[in-house]
Amino acid sequence: MRILVCMKQILDPDVPARDFRIDDSRNEAERAGANLVPNIFCENALETALQLRDAASGSVTALSFGTEEAEDVVRKALAMTVEEAALVTRPEGPAPDALTVARVLAAAARKLGDFDVVMVGRESGDWGVGQTGGLLAEELGLPMVALVDRAEPIDGGLTLRRQTDYGFDDVEAHGAVLATITNSEGNVPRIPKTRDVMKSYRKPLTTWSVDELGVAADETVAEVVELSMPDKHITCEFVEGDSLDERVDAFARKIADVMGAVG
Amino acid sequence: MSNDVVICLFASNGYDRAAQGVAGAGRNLAAQLGGSMHAVIVGPPEEVTTSAIAAVSDTVTVLDQPELADYQPELCLAALQQACEQKDPAAVLLGSDTASLELTARLAARLGGSPMSDGTALSVADGAIRVTRSAYGGKAEAVFELKKSPAVVWLRARGFEPAPETGGKASVDRLSVELPDESPVRVVERHQETHEGIPLDDAKLVVGGGRGIGGAEPFDELRQLAQVMTAAVGASRAACDEGWVPPSAQIGQTGKKIAPELYLAIAISGAAQHVLGISDAKVVCAINNDPDAQIFRHSHFGIVEDYRKVVPLLIERLRVLTS
């Protein structure tokens, strides 16, 4: 079983709100001193893929599209023991839209060969638009299952566990399929072993530039026209009282007031 | 292309608060575009659902083939594509259920349009549809202009005002669509998690717990509190990742986006990603032992104290106050 995992490098989403700034000239977050990190859902996807590989005997290929710095993401994937890694580089500048990304990933996937499963994160921690997976499925002509948190081999295919509003679905896929991956307690990314981190720098990495792939990036689906930081903070009234009992009483009364208004 | 808007609703959800919000957003957008609003109902609906949707729409198309009764992604996608093509709309709107999340991008691709997710406002500028949504995990707000038509957007539906009734009754047509005989992907089993108490999605009162709760068992105390309040119980991603509560109880950027009258955050730090899920709550209050916790910057009132001390007393007081 060959598994492809597409991974994105993003600005560290855990940068505290007080340090967050917008670069108005590009309608993007300012890089400032923030680190670049692998998108967490892409790491959940990689972990899900590695577990499937170990259960089904197969191989995992990690693929990223980004600036040259995105090599860190695929190196980390190598350290997490993927068999093969590839990177498509683009020049510095504003990030391309979801359709362009999907077309680049599709072109690279075709060059890498046939895959039984393609896994992508459900969305990224920067824009969080979450449309790349679906667009990629259409580019590759694959059926898709979204919000998957576990994949297990069955005879002639896979069972995917798909999170739903009411619990989860078991989805059977026969033939190649694309899954967007979400987080659960079962796919928390493993920490690479020091030895594997060392080895990852000696492993081969296939690199293409966007131009080399010959993808026509002549169409976009969406453009950011405004980016702002609306101040939604409100002033919190801390309940007062001489004892804990009094403070809890004041707190309870405020809650009861709202409950009374709701009826 | 017409100036019309298609709203896609699932029969199995009925005309719930989310469907009402999608219809409200659709009506507003149709007015801005100068077009009509068509509703498409996937699956065989109950009479009361069809009737409620017909009261707010200009036309209703029902896709009631039995194969569409239970959600199957490939069949639904094929059905929606055909129903939308018939109307040749400027925009297609969906709700925030997991089926809509799953289908939006692919439906957009098949209609030659632009997908977008989690819209909190829609506008039209020089004929182009713009979608407002949060970005950077709730730290910023972005306006996206969609470049290809139709715009295919799933909305944070409960945050939109319900559609007003038109005063008339839209005609209801059944459309028989071609469905693929065999689907390579099939839902074979649906697991309905049994939540004690009130369902989270449309709850008026919600109690949420975070990493600071410290384990699965202490959540029982939150459930007791919720029972006294007749509230639903939710959790932050951190608490779900620990396995203390199921993923379907997750509130936040990648969980449920709720719009209750009151949200009580207990031992939740208030990361932007979580706050994003409660931005439509009318009143937010918090219990946290850290006076500098971010959650207090989003709370109307709060108490700085270890929740383990507060919750038992709170249960007692609320029992008295609400009896």
Image (tube, grey):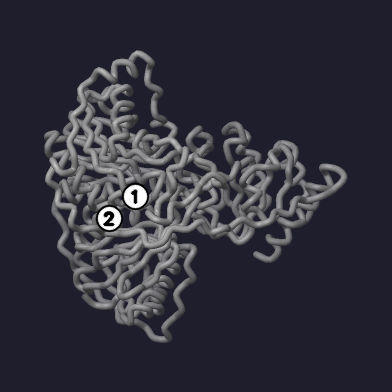
Relative to residue B267, is residue A236 depicted above or below?
below
Q: Horizontally, is B290 left or right of B275 in the view?
A: right
Location of residue A69 in the rendering, given as x and y in whole percent from the top left corner: 32, 34
- Mark 2 and mark 1 residues within 8 Å of each other at the beta carbon: yes
Location of residue A243 in the rendering, given as x and y in whole percent from the top left corner: 86, 43
Q: Which residue is mark 1?
A: A130
Residue at x 12% of width, y 37% of height:
A111
Residue at x 28% of width, y 35% of height:
A68
- Along the line of sight, which residue is nearer the eye, B221 or A212? A212
Q: Quadrant of residue A147?
A: top left
- Along the line of sight, which residue is nearer the eye, B4 or B11? B4
Give the mark count: 2
Relative to residue B104, is residue A175 depicted above or below?
above
Which three-letter amino acid code belongs to the residue tagged 1?
Answer: Gly
Relative to residue B175, is residue A178 depicted above or below?
above
Q: Which residue is mark 2?
A: B105
